[in-house]
Amino acid sequence: MPQKATSVKDKWRAKRWYPIFAPRIFGEVQLGVTPAYSAEMALGRKVETTLYELSGDTSMIHVHLYFKAAKNNGERLDTMFVGHEMSRDYIRSLIRRKSSKVNVIVDVTTKDGYTMRLKGLALTTYRCHRSQRTALRNIMSEVLKKKAQESSFDQFIQDVVFGKLSNDLFEVGKKIYPLRKVEIEKSKVLRLPAQ
């Protein structure tokens, strides 16, 4: 006996497309669109883009930014910054023979209560001793903590992403040992302020 044919409901057609926008500090540029049954279901989704796509500056193509949909304003999703990372190709292109690579990983808290983890990278002109690498690490972590405590979250993010903080670290670090390049290789938001 033949079975009765049942119609299959297309779940994909029931979804709507919601535009995702960058935070105000990045000019509220549209990052893309995402499908969802409702705007609430799209909250928490992560979006990756480059600083070049936001600013149009081709020299910033190696900086990858990560955002998370935090709230919905009607039909649009507003995001918050959750971290950034330099591309591996860019970091690899900076490393040279007969020079030292100094990494520092430090947790900092901004003036308005955001906790972040930063990974700094200093590349020296020549190979340096262990004591000089330790001194560089210490001074870099001190500067990062101090700058974070003096800045709001938005200001600190701009300093990290656009390279102002790297320049400050370079100026302080070159007094210890000749440096070729200093970068904030990676950042990640660990905790938000208590509401």
Image (cartoon, rainbow, N blue to C red):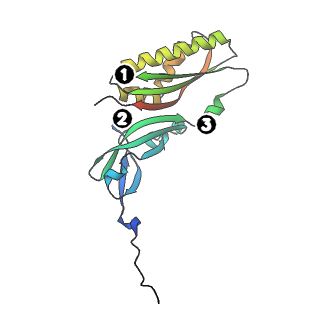
Q: Where is residue 182 in the image (x, y as percent from the top left)?
A: 56, 23
**143 and 37: which is toward the camera:** 37
Residue assigned mark 3:
88
Please report whichever mark, 3 or 1, sits nearer to the chain's N-terminal start: 3
Crowding near the residue tagged with mark 3, few <14, some 14–19, many ≥20 C-alpha atoms within 10 Å: few
Residue located at (32% from left, 53% from top): 39
Identified at 61% across, 35% down, the residue is 90
Name the residue beneath numbered marker 1: 151
- State the CA–CA distance, disc 2 to disc 1: 14 Å
Mark 3 to mark 2: distance in Å?
25 Å
The label on residue 136 is none
2 or 1: mark nearer the eye: 1
Find residue 36 and report its image quarter: bottom left
The residue sitting at 51% across, 36% down in the picture is: 60
Query: Residue 32 at what x, y percent from top left?
Result: 41, 51
In the displayed structure image, the side of residue 130 where residue 145 appears, left or right: left
Instruction: Name the N-terminal-most of marks 3 and 2.
Output: 2
Q: Identify the secondary structure beneath mark 3.
A: helix
Quadrant of res 29? top left
Give 151 or 107, whichever is nearer the viewer.
Answer: 107
Residue toward you, 51 or 156: 156
User: Which mark's residue is nearer the viewer, 3 or 2?
Assistant: 3
Q: Which amino acid does label 1 sit on?
A: Ser
- Does the residue at mark 2 contact the one at mark 1 (Cβ under 8 Å)? no
Q: In which quarter of the image is residue 34?
A: bottom left
Amino acid at the residue labelled 2: Ile
